[in-house]
Amino acid sequence: MKKTLFLLVLVVLAVSSCATARYYGGFTPENARQDMALMGPVSSIYYLDENYNESFNDTLSIISETLITRLVDEMGVPVSGRIELNDDEKEEAFAFLRYLYERDWETFDTFPIPDLLDKALEAQGYRYGLVLVARGMTRDAKEYAKEVALNVLVDVALTVLIPGTAVVPIPSDSCYSQISAAVLDSETDRIVFYNATVPKEKNPLRPGTVQKQLNKLLKDFLR
């Protein structure tokens, strides 16, 4: 049941994100180079145990936030500073980008930015704030390794019995990763940029995976 539910969630997220497109509201990548700070980032990483029970994991979420912060710096994303968010601000950022993820981007210019995030920007003297929110899940590494090992044994057996027909099936519910990005304008109190990746069955803590997602999200800023 847990496996079915997990796969269903991925399908729903992927379908809902098909309509997502990069949104610009009177904002250009050149603006970012003038006065933009990284806000957060904010990560919500869940852990899937050997019984397919999911639970939020604070440690994994912090690891994800640290990884994203490092990659933003290494990739040369044009932010001139970082605003660390407290728990309330993180909750507001996560809820706001989740709200945007489920809405039609053509209506984004009507949404005021969250008050807590607006105040955080103004307090630090920045006009623009880049908010990155990551959602993901990773599973019990030992259990995953056992499943892979079992599949390999089945593969070897099939190869012996029916040469040339074996395929090694990798468990499809091992993990997933999705990232959303928004640029907030504290002067107009509006969103001026938004983009989101389609959920992928990838490890949200693997640097290569996260960097590819960030490249896709922020490619216009990296030119």
Image (cartoon, rainbow, N blue to C red):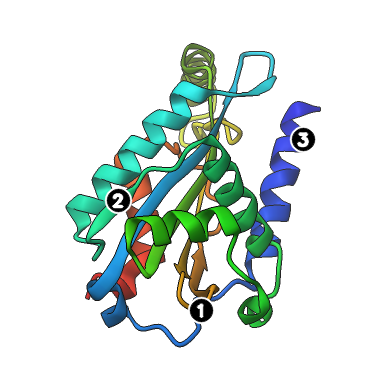
What's the residue type where badge 1 is placed? Thr
Residue 4, numbered label: 3
- Write the residue at 68% across / 80% down: 107
**Horizontal and vertical percent for residue 95?**
64, 50
**Horizontal and vertical percent for residue 146?**
51, 13
**Which of 130/177 is in front?**
130
**Which of 164/186 is in front?**
186
**Horizontal and vertical percent for residue 210?**
37, 47
Spatial CA span between label 2 and label 1: 21 Å
**Which of 107/124 is in front?**
124
Q: Residue furthest right?
A: 1
Q: Quadrant of the N terminus?
A: top right
- Write the residue at 50% across / 61% down: 118
Q: Is residue 84 above or below residue 113?
A: above
Please say whether residue 50 is visible from this viewpoint. yes
Residue 188, numbered label: 1
Give left or right: position of 125 versus 167. left
Which numbered disc, 2 or 3, marks the residue closer to the eye? Answer: 2
Q: Could you say which quadrant of the image residue 28 lies in?
A: bottom left
Residue 135, numbered label: none
Which numbered disc, 1 or 3, marks the residue closer to the eye? Answer: 1
> Which one is earlier in the sequence, the residue at label 2 or at label 1?
2
Which numbered disc, 2 or 1, marks the residue closer to the eye? Answer: 1
> Which one is earlier in the sequence, the residue at label 1 or at label 3?
3
Secondary structure of the residue carrying numbered label 1: loop
Spatial CA span between label 2 and label 3: 39 Å
Q: Is residue 108 above or below residue 160?
A: below
What's the residue type where badge 2 is placed? Arg
Name the residue beneath numbered marker 2. Answer: 82
Q: Quadrant of the C terminus?
A: bottom left
Q: Are marks 1 and 3 in contact (CB under 8 Å)?
A: no
